[in-house]
Image: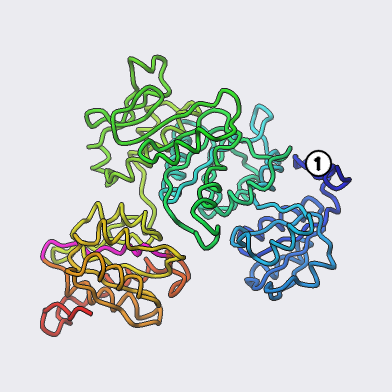
């Protein structure tokens, strides 16, 4: 063991000696800045290397004592080589095949993500018992943010100090350093973050209280290189789990992840689905969400968490949302939250913007924004809820084939509106699997005009008492800054049309299909 690795093994506490440690930070978004800020506060020597630097962060770096090299990363920057970092902390956008990541690994330099750093310094603020916050981990192809928010809400309703963080938008390091402190952090993890977390299984390895992989479908294949590599990254969520490995009984892959995981002795496998639960499961019995995992006598009794009718009144009864609720409840119950607190949390819970969000109901037409459906697996849930909608679909498919989605669900839609710079995948999928469905295309490549045109086409294609559904099944970055901007522009276009009324239509007839 080298002197450096000996030193890194000691860096498992905020109170360890981080002074002078040479750390290069790759990327300067919210995550990259939180890493640089943390390390500078610890006294490390910090160099940030980024292709672009937002002004707000670039101005702050010298104030906190870090340096910035804004440069191309197509090759290895000389500043990085000259700096000779002892540790590199990469933002999760950098894939394993990125030339700088390959160089770091070839040089034998320690490579971390922000999650590993956060785990190592998690004791900056401790609980009343002197211990740092417990961590609950949430991943999956879809439903991560909803489940993370749900679990945190249930914990707070149960009297704990809890915060959702991670891939949900709040860097984990910001939560760890919050002076108020928390009893539990509910950490949403992307497959990118999990890949970095999986690089080190040594003394600094993360040990979660409980964890869940909600589901698994092909996504981010270009980043990971293969479906198997994506699956392996997701499976890291269960590693070293202490109390509950929560898995989806309707998704066999998540069950296999739990079976194969190296967990802490005593950890339990807890299943959830929409069927009748067995012992150690959560599910539904006669319209009641029931917990048979965290009750005294699991074989003969169950705890009632809520009813499907109650969820329906709150707009939360869609099957995939109910599954998320059960997963979140399993995490909360694993921590000791009472069923009554779970029920109270659901009484006031609101879904995220752009997640099956009803924008408006006007002239008999419901306009639904599910811009957060950024892959085919997520879009399936939307199309299941609204099978005969006019479907707005398309964007950046990230190497994913939507043929299976169109074959399974596309044939039932009233019409399809294709958006995106490259609409060939949509056109080809409908020609092959649903040629009877009218397909219209928005050929406007400018961000400002896309949604106005899509809404115009949808309004002319939708029938009485119909639904127009934005569920792109693709990422947004070909035309928008984020799925949020895509959804916002859709909502703006819908509201503008409603304010104008329908008199703009020249003849009220449907457009010609392309």
The stretch in magenta equals 464-474
Can the viewer see residue 361 in this picture? no
Q: Of residues 458 and 263, which is closer to you in this image?
A: 263
Q: In this view, does 388 lie above or below 163?
A: below
> Which element type, helix, strand or loop, lies under badge 1?
loop
SS assignment for the magenta stretch, majority: loop
Please give the residue where the numbered disc 1 appears in the rendered image.
Answer: 16
Query: Residue 212 colored magenta?
Result: no
Q: In this view, does 95 lie above or below 128?
A: below
Query: Residue 471 colored magenta?
Result: yes
Q: Residue 376: percent from the left, percent from the top? A: 36, 58
For residue 122, side relative to residue 3 (left or right): left
Quadrant in the picture for the C terminus = bottom left
Quadrant in the picture for the N terminus = top right
Q: Residue at x 52, y 63 (%)?
A: 222
Q: Residue 287: percent from the left, percent from the top? A: 23, 32
Q: Which residue is drawn at 22% across and 66% down?
A: 434
Q: Residue 299: percent from the left, percent from the top? A: 36, 16
């Amino acid at each position: 063991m080298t002197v450096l690795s000996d030193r890194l093994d000691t860096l498992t506490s905020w109170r360890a000696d981080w002074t002078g440690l040479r750390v290069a930070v790759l990327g300067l978004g919210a995550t990259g800045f939180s890493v640089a800020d943390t390390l500078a506060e610890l006294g490390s020597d910090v160099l940030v290397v980024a292709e672009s630097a937002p002004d707000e962060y670039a101005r702050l770096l010298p104030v906190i004592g870090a340096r910035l090299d804004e440069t191309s990363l197509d090759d290895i920057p000389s500043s990085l080589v000259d700096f000779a970092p002892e540790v590199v902390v990469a933002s999760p956008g950098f894939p394993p095949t990125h030339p700088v990541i390959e160089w770091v690994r070839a040089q034998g330099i320690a490579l971390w993500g922000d999650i590993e750093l956060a785990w190592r310094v998690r004791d900056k603020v401790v609980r009343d018992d002197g211990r740092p916050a417990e961590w609950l981990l949430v991943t999956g192809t879809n439903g991560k943010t909803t489940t993370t928010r749900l679990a945190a809400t249930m914990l707070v309703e149960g009297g704990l100090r809890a915060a959702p963080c991670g891939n949900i938008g709040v860097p984990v390091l910001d939560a760890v350093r919050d002076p108020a402190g928390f009893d539990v952090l509910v950490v949403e993890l992307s497959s990118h973050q999990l890949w970095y977390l999986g690089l080190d299984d040594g003394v600094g390895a993360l040990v979660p209280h409980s964890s869940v992989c909600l589901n698994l479908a092909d996504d981010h294949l270009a980043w990971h290189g293969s479906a198997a590599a994506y699956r392996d990254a997701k499976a890291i969520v269960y590693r070293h789990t202490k109390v509950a490995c929560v898995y989806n009984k309707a998704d066999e892959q998540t069950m296999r992840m739990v079976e194969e995981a190296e967990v802490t002795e005593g950890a339990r496998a807890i299943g959830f689905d929409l069927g009748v639960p067995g012992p150690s499961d959560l599910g539904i019995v006669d319209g009641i969400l029931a917990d048979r995992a965290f009750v005294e006598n699991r074989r003969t009794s169950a705890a009632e968490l809520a009813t499907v009718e109650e969820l329906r009144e709150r707009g939360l009864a869609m099957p995939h949302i109910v599954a998320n609720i059960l997963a979140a409840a399993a995490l909360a119950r694993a921590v000791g939250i009472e069923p009554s607190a779970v029920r109270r949390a659901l009484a006031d819970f609101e879904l995220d913007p752009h997640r099956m969000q009803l924008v408006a109901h006007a002239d008999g037409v419901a306009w639904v924004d599910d811009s957060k459906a950024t892959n085919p697996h997520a879009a399936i849930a939307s199309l299941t809820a609204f099978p005969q909608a006019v479907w707005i679909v398309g964007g950046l498919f990230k190497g994913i084939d939507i043929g299976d989605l169109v074959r399974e669900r596309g044939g039932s839609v009233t019409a399809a509106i294709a958006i995106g710079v490259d609409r060939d995948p949509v056109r080809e999928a409908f020609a092959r699997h649903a040629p009877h469905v009218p397909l219209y295309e928005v050929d406007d490549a400018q961000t400002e005009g896309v949604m106005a045109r899509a809404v115009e086409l949808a309004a002319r294609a939708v029938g009485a008492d119909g639904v127009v559904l934005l569920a792109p099944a693709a990422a947004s970055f070909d035309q928008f800054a984020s799925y949020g901007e895509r959804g916002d522009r859709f909502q703006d276009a819908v509201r503008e049309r409603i304010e104008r009324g329908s008199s703009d239509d020249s003849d009220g007839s449907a457009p010609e299909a392309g």
